[in-house]
Amino acid sequence: MIDQLKTYFPQIVTNVCLWKSNKSRIFIFDPKENKILEIHSEEKANFTIENPNLKEINILAIDKCIFDDDSGHKKCDFAAFDNQTFVFVEIKDTYKRRADKKKNAKAQLEDTIKKFQNAIDFSNYKVFIIISWRYKPIRPAISTGMQQAAFYFRENFNVVLIEGNQFTFN
């Protein structure tokens, strides 16, 4: 996977967009004006990667690293992957789950999936796309629109759409 990514997106190397971590909990922060960062503080993290088996997890900055603001298309913030699971994440900078924010997040994830699936072989991977909100909700709110979007992404791109502030690699 890493070789494919570097071949199709050589800016991964020049812009230092890819790194690895084997921590049990990996905290991701999106500073908005720059690429995502791995940080040490759960309180300041926008997204948490749970890694109970201490696997080597690859973290790939997409927005403002592989693609800049002048790329001419929408893109999600980052991806994380191991040897069987690939996860694309869009962190929305809002404390409200408004329909327009969800629509924009879905468009960003869709454009990113299209770019990556045109270049990378995901046949041996389970692929997830996640809309993450800066706040930590008490309970999930699954709307009809999100159910329809989940069906759309599964049928058209063979990916699983979920909302949340964390993902667990097993």
Image: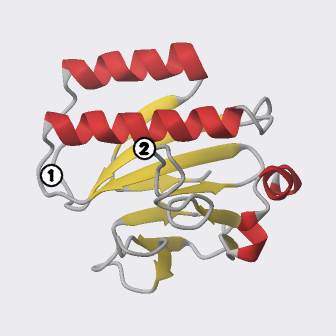
Q: Is residue 27 left or right of residue 12?
A: left
Q: In this view, does 141 lie to the left or right of 16?
A: left
Q: Which of marks 1 and 2 is in front?
A: 2
Position of residue 88 measured from the top left corner of the image (x, y, whole percent):
53, 47
What's the residue type where badge 1 is placed? Ile
Image height of 128 relative to 43, above or below: above
Residue drawn at point x = 42 percent, y = 15 percent: 151
Local SS, label 1:
loop
Image height of 35 relative to 160, above or below: below
Position of residue 99 measured from the top left corner of the image (x, y, whole percent):
16, 34
Image height of 160 relative to 43, above or below: above
Q: Is residue 149 left or right of residue 23?
A: left
Is residue 21 visible in this depiction of the protein? Answer: no
Q: How is the image coloured?
A: secondary structure
Local SS, label 2:
strand
Residue drawn at point x = 45 percent, y = 73 percent: 27
Q: Which mark is residue 15?
A: none
Is residue 136 visible in this depiction of the protein? Answer: yes
Image height of 146 relative to 170, above or below: above
Residue drawn at point x = 69 percent, y = 33 percent: 117
Residue drawn at point x = 78 percent, y = 29 percent: 123
Pointer 2: what residue? 130
Mark 1–mark 2 Cα distance, whole angstroms, equals: 17 Å
What's the residue type where badge 2 is placed? Ile
- Viewer-closest of 23 and 38: 38
Q: In this view, does 86 lie to the left or right of 104?
A: right
- Res. 141 image quadrant: top left
Pointer 1: what residue? 138
